[in-house]
Image: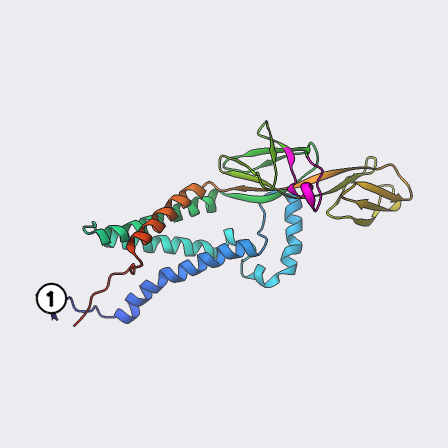
Amino acid sequence: MVQGRYTLPARPRGYFTVTRAWWLFPWACLWLLVLGGSAAHLWPQRPDGDTTALAEFQSVRARHPTASALGLLDVRHAFWYNAAGAGLGIWLLDRLLASGRPRHWREWRGALVRAGGLIWLVGWGWTQTAGWQGDLFLAPGQVAQIGEVVPLSVQFSGFVVPPAPAGPGRELRMALTVNGTPVEISTREPHRQGGWTLVPRWYGGMVTLGESAPLYFGASGTRAITLSGGQRMTVTVEVESLRVLTVPPRPARAAWYAVVRARYDPGHQVRLIGALGSVVAVMLWGGERLRPSATVG
């Protein structure tokens, strides 16, 4: 087939089956990655480490059985999510190597898009393998040791401003000791260190009755308990004011505990670099398609 002075290669056999399927493959992988990323924002995800958070997560699974069965409550460990990232990386590397050495500006821009996607996937894979996420339920003075690749020691000292569901207390400004260094965090000013992010999530009331194990209240209310000696009683707590009423009367101490959300995301900056490179290339491209096409006459 001839167009002008140039001979166009014949269309390879199986074009509408193999080739088209190969170009649909990355879109399927990208759709699965978007689905997984969206699920991580729409549903609570399985936490790492903290036993209290894991116990709370079991009730979440019971409320969302379908999402749990599909792996949408534990996206980071879901096979389909990791397979989609690996598949997209293989496709991008294949297209980058198949394109050869870029010679024209358009080829350079296409290579930059693919290279940016690969860099983003490197950061994504880094967090998938070495990341950590979960909620810490910390009583005053309690120390939590979290993380495996980059361990972190977190101790809750107390609230700088009394917590409240509205007003200044909603900022949840609290004092922590992170790896031996005192810091203050709030919902607007989280603590970031070496890929870690610590941000307040909420608070609750902790009641201690003598030598008995502390009782944790996530909200104001009444709870019936049985003490170690077999005595039954009810405990009523108003979380905002820490007022405690026991029936029958018994000495009790109340304090706030903090719920801190911790996340280790070492690949964040790498993903940012990759995404920025791809976006710049697409903007320079002026909206042209990633796949070059030839007009056949």
Magenta span includes 163:
yes
- Report x, y in % for residue 194: 49, 34
Q: Which residue is mark 1?
A: 7
The image position of residue 222, as x and y in percent, is 82, 49
Amino acid type indicated by mark 1: Thr
In the image, residue 180 sits, relative to residue 135, either above or below, namely above
State the image quarter where residue 227 is shown.
top right
Q: Nearer the viewer, residue 57 or 221?
A: 221
Asked which secondary structure carries label 1, the reply is: strand
Q: Is residue 122 left or right of residue 47?
A: left
Question: Quadrant location of the C terminus?
Answer: bottom left
Write the residue at 34% across / 53% down.
90
The image quarter in which residue 95 lies:
bottom left
Furthest-left residue in this view: 5
Mark 1: give few (<14), some (14-19) or many (20+) Cα within 10 Å: few
Residue with the most extreme front position:
167
Residue 157 x/y as whole percent: 67, 31
Magenta region, residue range:
161-175
Asked if residue 109 lies left or right of residue 65, the reply is: left
Q: Residue at x 23, y 64 (%)?
A: 293
